Structure formats: C-alpha cells, structure tokens
Image (cartoon, grey):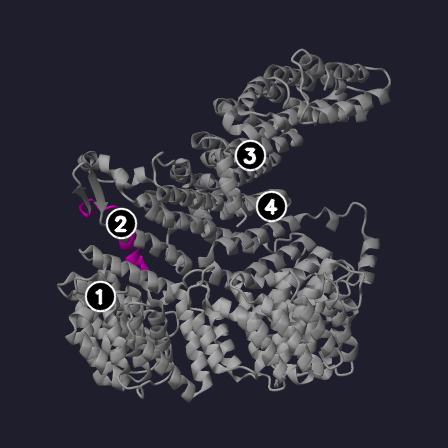
Amino acid sequence: MANLTLTGILEKMTGKDKDYRYMATSDLLNELNKESFKLDADLEPKLSNIIIQQLDDAAGDVSGLAVKCLAPLVKRIHEQQILDMTTKLCDKLLNGKEQHRDIASIALKTIVAEVPTAPIAQSVLVSISPKLIRGITAQGMSTEIKCESLDILCDVLHKYGNLMTSDHEVLLHALLPQLNTNQASVRKKAVSCIASLASSLSDDMLAKATVEVVRILKNTATKSDITRTNIQMIGAVSRSVGYRFGPHLGDTVPILINYCNNASENDEELREYSLQALESFLLRCPRDISSFCDQILHLTLEFLSYDPNFTDNMEEDTDDESYAEEEDDESANEYTDDEDISWKVRRAAAKCLAALIVSRREMLSRLYEEACPKMIDRFKEREENVKVGAFSVLKELVMVLPDCLADHIGSLTPGIEKALCDKSSTSNLKIEALVFTRLVLASHAPSVFHPHIKAISAPVISAVGERYYKVTAEALRVCGELVRVVRPNIEGYDFDFKPYVHPIYSAIMSRLTNQDQDQEVKECAISCMGLVVSTFGDHLVGELPACLPVLVDRMGNEITRLTAVKAFSVIAASSLHLDLSCILEHVISELTAFLRKANRALRQATLGTLNTLIVGYGDKIGSAAYEVIVAELSTLISDSDLHMAALALELCCTLMADRRSGPNVGLTVRNRVLPQALALVRSSLLQGHALLALQNFFGALVYSANTSFDVLLDSLLATAKSSGLSGAVAKQALFSIAQCVAVLCLAAGDKKCSSTVNMLTDILKADGSTNSAKQHLSLLCLGEIGRRKDLSSHDHIENIVIESFQSPFEEIKSAASYALGNIAVGNLPKYLPFILDKIDNQQKKQYLLLHSLKEVIVRQSVDKAEFDDSSVEKITNLLFNHCESEEEGVRNVVAECLGKIALIEPGKLVPALKERISNPAAFTRATVVIAVKYSIVERQEKIDEVLYPEISSFLMLIKDHDRHVRRAAVLALSTAAHNKPNLIKALLPELLPLLYDQTVIKKELIRTVDLGPFKHTVDDGLELRKAAFECVDTLLDSCLDQVNPSSFIVPYLLSGLDESYRFKFEPAFIASQSQNFSSLPDHYDVKMPCHLILSKLADKCPSAVLAVLDSLVDPLQKTINFRPKQDAVKQEVDRNEDMIRSALRSIASLNRISGGDCSHKFKNLMNEITKSQALWEKYSSIRNE
C-alpha cells in the first residue's frame, strides 16, 4: 500500500467524526490483514501511537476495532515498537483511568498471544513482567488492578512460562501471598496464575510452593476461606503438573482427608474442593496414590450420602400438593433447598469414585461390593447433578465389569423410572439414565430383566416421544436393546412378550413416519424398526403393509438409505420368514442400483442384504433381476478391495446355487464375472476370505448351465502363463490357482478329476528344464487335489513327484515337497511309510522330505485327524534323531513337525519333549522349546491340559547358558502370550525379570571380525534382544495386568531407544570397542519394536510413561534428527526414514496422554517438530492414519 494512502487513513482515524474514525480503523484492519501489506520504518511509530490512542476512544466500537488491529500489527512491526506499546499499555493498566483499564488489559493479552518469535517474546516478557508483579504486590493497588494483572500474567505464564525460568522464584514469592488476601477475586485469580506457573516450575520450586501451602493448611488458626483457596490451589496445581505432583501426596492427602472428616458442618465447599483434589490425584498420580486408595474409597462412600439437612426418616418424595402446603408455612428466614449446597459434596464424591473405578482395576471386586449399593441408593437423591453423577459412576462400573448389576436390577429400576418420568428431570439426566439403561440391557442376561420389564419399558417408550432429539435418539437405542431382551429367542421362551409388542411398535412408528426431525433420530428409528419387525413380525401382520413401505421410502433418501439397507438385512435374516411381497421387487431394484454408488459402506451393506434376501426370498425374485445383479457384481471383483470382492463372489455363488435361476444367469456369470475372477486369481494379494469365496465360485460355476469344465480348467491354467502386460505370475498367485483348480476338479466329479491328474503327471514326466512354470503349477495342483482326494489309483504318482526333487529350480523342488506331503494326506497308510523311508535313506533329499512330512502333520493337526500308534512312534523317533542337525532349516522343520504332532498326541509327545530339555546338546534343547512354541495355537486343543503343568519347565530355559536356547524360550513365551495367555500368567512374576535381562547387551556376545582394511563388530545377541522386545510388546496386549511398566521402561526400554544408554559394560571394554559400536545394527532392529512398545504403553499405561517422560525425549529427539551420511546407499536412507516415522508415531502417542504438556522437554520437542516442515508433514500424516 502506498504511504500516501496509509497517511490518509491515519488522518481520518484522528478526526472528530466518530463514523470517520470507525471506517478508517476498519480500512486499516483490512489492510493489515493483507499478505502484501508492507510498512515503512518511519510510519511504524506513528501507526503504533495512533492505535494505542484509539484504545481510549469514547466510542466503544472504535476502540474494539483498534484492539483487533493489534493482532496483525504485532507481526509486522519491529521489536522496539512492540516494547513501546506494551510499556504504554502497562502504564494505562496500572496508572490510567478506570474506564480504560479493561481495554488496556485486552490489548496486552492480544499482544502476548500474537508475538511472532521467541526472541521478541523474551524481550516483551522482560518488559512487562516487573510491571505486572508491581501491579500484584505494590501497596495501595486496587483489587481491580490486581485481578487484571493476575489475569494477564496467567496468559503470559501459560504460553511463555518456560522462557521465564530466571523469574520463577520472584513470581512465586509474589503470587503465593495472594492466596491469603481478603479479596476472594484476587485469591481465585492467583490460583489460576500459580497453576499456569507450576507447569514450568522446576521440581525444587514446585516443592517450595507445595511446602508453603501445606504449612498454611496445617495451621489451625487459618481462616476457612483462606483454607478453601489453598485446597483449590493444590487441586489446580495437580491438574497442571500431573504426575510431577506425586512426591508431594504424602504431605497433602492426609491433610485433605482430615479436612473432609473434620470440617465444620456447613463448610461444604471445603469438602468439595478436597474431594476434587483427591480425584485429580487418582487420575494423574496413580502410582503414588496407591497407598491412600483404601482411605479415599472409605471417604467417598461416606460422602456419597452426605446430606446434613435431610435424614432417612424424612419422607423424600412428597407430592406437589403437600409440598405446596409446606412452602406456604415456611417463613422467609427459614433455611431452604436453594441454600443447600451439600449436593456439591455428594457430586464430588461420585466423581472421585468414578476416578477410582477407571484407574484402579485391581479394586474392582471391592468397588462392586461396596460401591454398588451406595450408588443405587443415590437414585433417591434430591439434587439432579448428583443423580447424573450416580448414573455416570454406575455406567463406568458396567463398562469395566459387565454383568455386575444382575442382583441389583430390582433396586435400579425405580431410579431409572423416576429419572425418566419426573417432570423436573432435565435432558442431561434423562440422557445419562438412558445410556446407562442401554449398557445394562446389553451386558446382562435377558432373564434378569423379565420381572421388571413393565417398569422399565413404560418410561423408555414414553421417552421416545420427547421433544429433545438427543433424548429421543437414546430412547430409540434403548428400545432396540429392549426388543432383544423381551424376546431373546424366536423359537420359544417362557416370558410373555405380547403385551409389549404394539406399544413399542407404535412409539417407533410415530418417529419413523415423522420427516421433520434430526437425522440421528431418523437413523435410530429405522434401525429400531428393523429389529422390531424381525423380532415381532409374526404379531404385526396387520401393521407390516403400512410399516414396510415407509422403510422402502427411507432407502430412497440419500441420508438414511445406508441405515435402511441394514434394517432390511436384519428383517430378511429373521427366522420368522415374513411376507415381504408388497415391497420385495422395489427393494431389489433399489439395492441393485446401490451397487453402482461410490459409497463403499453402502455397497458393502447392499451386498450382504441382497445375499440374505436371495437366500430367504429367492422364490419370489425373478431370473431377470438376477441377471441385472450379476452384471453389477462384475465391477466389484478386483484386488483393490478384497473384502468387497469376497462379498460379490459369495452373492454370485448364492445366485448360481438357487435352482430357480434360469440358464441365462449362468451365461451372464460366465460372460461378465468369470473374466474378473480369472484376473483376481492372478493377484498376489489374494488370501483368506476372498480366496475361499473365489474357490467356492469356481466350484459353483461347474454346476451352472452353459459352462464347460474343460474350458474352465484351461482358463484357470492359462492364468499362470506370463503375459507381456502383467509379467510373470507371483508365487502366491500360483498357490491360489492350484487351490481353485483342485476345487474345480472335485466339483466336476471323479472322471474329470482323474483325467486332470493324468494330464498334470504327463507334464511332470516331460523335460522340466525348459518350462519350469508349467511344472511348478502342476505340482501345486497335484498337491491340492491329493489333499482333498485319494490319488493312490494313479500308479507311482509319488515317484513321479519325487523325481522333481532333482530339478535345477528351487521353486520346483519346494513345490514337489509340498505336493508329496499333500498327496500323502489323501492316503496316509500308503504314502506316509514311503516318506519316512526316504527320509532315512536319502540324505541329500532330507530337507525336502522333512517339509513333505511337515505338510502331512500340519494338515492332520488342523483337521484333528489321528495317526496310528506305530506311525507316531516312527515319526517321533525320526524327528528326534534330527534335532541336532547343523542346518538351522532342518531343525526348524523338525521343531514344527514335533509341535504339530504334539497337538495330535499330546500324552506321548509332551513327556518326550520334556525329557530332552536337559539334553547336553544345545541344538536339541532349542529344538524342543521351539516345538512347544508350535504346539501353542489359538484354538482350544487337548494339549492345553497336558502342557499347562509342564510349560514352566520349557520356558525356564530362558536361563540357559546358550543364546539359541534362550531365544527359543523367548519365542515360545511370546507365542504363549499371544495365543494362550492363561498358560503363562502365573509364571510371569518369575519370567519377566529374566525376559527383561535378555534385552540388555551382553559383552560376551559381541565379537570383532577383522576384514583387513577395517574391523567389523558383530553382535550375536541382536536376534535374542529383538525377540525379547517383541515378546514384551505381545505381553502388553495380552497380560498387561501382570506387567509392571515402571520397572521395564527404565532401564530396559530406555536402553533399547537410546544407543548411548545401552552400553553398561566396564569402562575398559567401552574404550576398546567404542570405534566399532556404530556398526551395531540396533539402530533399526531393536529401536523399531521399542517404539511400538512405547506407543502401546502411552495408550495403556499413561501414568507410568508420564513419570519418566523427560528421560524418553532425548532418545526420540536423536532419532528424528539423525541424518545418514551423504554416501549412504538407498537401503540405509529408507531404513532411516522408517525409523523416523516410527519415532514420530511414538511421539504422537505420547502427545495424546493427558498431562504430557507438563514436561517442558516434551513441549520443546513438539515445538521443534512443528517448526520443521519435513517433520511436521510426516507427523501430520501419521496422526491422520
């Protein structure tokens, strides 16, 4: 902007006309907000002075605009001008006219908030801090000036407290005396100010402040209002500094408990503030508060019913008439409920109890026994805020301890009924009561509610008609749970549900037909009506013709169609098999159209609903509709969304399996869907549910009209050929093709299957050196067919397959091993002895033959089949003979075979394995422990009972002198923690210290390899340490209640995060190896699991992490700032990028912890990330994952 234009604006700003001044100030504000605005140095003082003058403008709207101008102006002028403005504003605040004080305060706060850089902020703080302290402490200062000064100082400390370290002591000495002044407003502001200061105080200064407050509280002569303020201060500081207040709980908690018990009868505020402080301690210092939890529980239970103005023999629930008579008789001077604030004590006690429930899981059983009756008793409460608190506490209890209120339903019901029916109940109370009712209905057995259904249902149904949409929506959700409770079993149940059918239906129908209501209510009404129709439909025959079209209409609305589609899925799946003929055609048409929509959730729900409708109502849907659906499905089958592809293929199978579908449906599937299926089978991503659906699709396609088996087989085999566009087929895709071929052959019958096997064996007999891909697929196909069907009718097929062991191609040999094992599954008596004999006699093929044996054993264990006794003995003897093999691959296969055969014959194998844990050969000990690892699977097995008393013998090998054995024990522990945590929970107190010890670098496992020009340091313990950290990660998921995070984080996790921390060897050893430490590979292999552990600890045990947060910052900071050398190869660069993202993921988890901002070091780390564009972009993308 030209200087002339700015000068014109400034002249108008000083004019006499108020409107001119207003318009000129508005123009200036617009100019200042433009990015292109530039201010000449000579105009800065003039502009700054005029804006300061405008703050005193008699017209309030002009001075208000002047304050708004300060925010952009501060970012565009030099430091000296900012300091001049703050000096003038402080002068106005402390010495100016009273009417200008408020605007000067607002202006100062604006400048403090908008200071652009830390150096300028430092200068501003140096300028204004002494003045603000003078405004607080100087004699003769009015209460208003003190309050404004404290208010501004609070903002300053909150934003820049860590920049004022040198002034902390001065500030503390200025603020603490304000807690003892006679002006209540000053004391209140001082509490906020000290809380803001506390977050940046050192531990020593924080201790000084706490000691001073404790001294005042211990003084019995202190006035009650001063005492209340100091207790408030303790609570505020605790909320500000979080875990750092822990060391001071020993001094403060007894005082607070004493005040609660011994305060005067009318001093409810003192009790309330004390309970609020205790609640803060429970949530923020769970480790240090442990020793006081019993006392706090006793205290909260006592004060839950604290009501000095009401006794049990008084009739609480008076009717309106008698209450009115009492009101008339009262004198004006008599104590009334309006003056009674004892409810605040009861509410604070309820919140304190909720904090106990959330933070002290180990006390749940006691809380249930002692707190439940007390909380239920609070439903008689006169004060609504306490009732809300009671529902909230019980809700927390139900969430952490489901089915805990089964014995109290009769006591709960009147409280729920009163909360929902009382005319004086607010929406907040009704919502809390409804949420609690829904959780109770969902988490308890239906039978416990049946005696009370009448009392529960009436107020809930009435709440459906409430005007406030949040109450209505929650009431509808409760109705949904009520429907399940009233009729839990369609086939038959003792409870008579019929009286409740029409009242529930009518209430929901009135909401369903009402268009003029909130979307949340509409969606809840649709979902609930779906449940009502599917559960009570046989008793609503007359109402369905009116109800169903309304649901169809909701499918046509973009906002409600997803919910309506899900509702129809529920209705179609009902075992009542209702008559839907009046809307079926329209629904199918709408659903078919939805398959073209971009909304993934809608397409997913549509596929499920169509499948359910065709299974239940296929006889009423025409073949033409099937063809249209198939055509739409073809676009959904691709590896870009495997879940959607699986649903689409399942629907195709349902359509083809329907006998009523005409020949055209099969033809449409072959023309439209088959090409997509053949493309999908080539995908390397295909697995799980989608692969199973694809297999079923090919099996179903054989039976459909106009489909030739030979054409299908040729098409499938052709997908394995390399193409110019997509290149060679991935190895995983060959397995998928082979499985589809096997399913196809079995579906086609014995004749087609036999001819296919002959064709495949002919391929194997040909020269394998020219076309390995063809041989590879043939072997896989034979294996998949042989696993499903006995191939012994094909002479010497086992010899044909084993010939491929001679192939020059590794993938062919592996496929042959896989095929031989799977063929043996089809006829064990014939092929198992053949494999065992070959293992003994052909040393060169031993590894491949062991893999074949593994396929046999794994398949038998999965299918829960059994070997005969002689076979088991032969197999185990053979396997134990190979436990000491020098080849790690052979030992691993042997271990897996032993583990899987133990699933089949645990009584024989577990003792045999245990016998060998004392074997002198380390490889044997390691192999048997790994075998135990493979025997621990997620599903329930008969081995569990046998293994439970013996597993400690195997896991205690974590103390073995050989690192291979220790690593095997760690891996077994990790698998047990993941699959069967109950097996090892009782052993963890002894195992955890041993496991933690495996995370430490052992000097005896570090060796130096001389490579001539340089030396390379090798850490043989790396894999063991990595396995140990990964085991801890697993334990955090499954056995968190047994793990003490505090003892692990320091020193073990910290050593994994920080390279400089982990070397705890003798100084001489460090000196001798220091030049080689940089080559140790911990930088990636150990740090990555450590970051993952830290993220989980931050989410699950935030208090333990908070206690050592400062020590965690340095290693994380080093990691995100590490840069590879300029000549680093791409792999090193990529690994470092992964490491940085991993560390940032941990930092994001730490940043979510409540109270994390109490750590200055962590605050500074976050500021560093914010200022670095590269780090901030990565951090933002991680946070949005």
Look at the magenta stretch and give its main secondary structure: helix
State yes or no: discs 2 and 1 in contact (Cβ < 8 Å).
no
4 or 2: tag closer to the N-terminus: 4
Residue 1036 lies, with reference to residue 1059, above or below; the image says: below
State the image coordinates of residue 82 (x, y, percent, origin top left).
63, 18
Q: Amino acid at mark 2?
A: Leu
Queried whether the magenta region covers residue 219, the answer comes back as no
State the image coordinates of residue 930 (x, y, percent, origin top left).
26, 65
Marks 2/1: CA–CA distance:
22 Å
Label number found at residue 272: 4
Q: Amino acid at mark 3?
A: Ala
SS for tag 2?
A: helix
Marks 4/2: CA–CA distance:
55 Å
Residue 524 lies, with reference to residue 168, above or below; the image says: below
Tell me: 132 left or right of 46.
left
Q: Amino acid at mark 4?
A: Glu
SS for tag 4?
A: helix
Along the viewing direction, whichever of 633 and 957 lies nearer the viewer? 633
What residue would you read off at disc 1?
Answer: 890
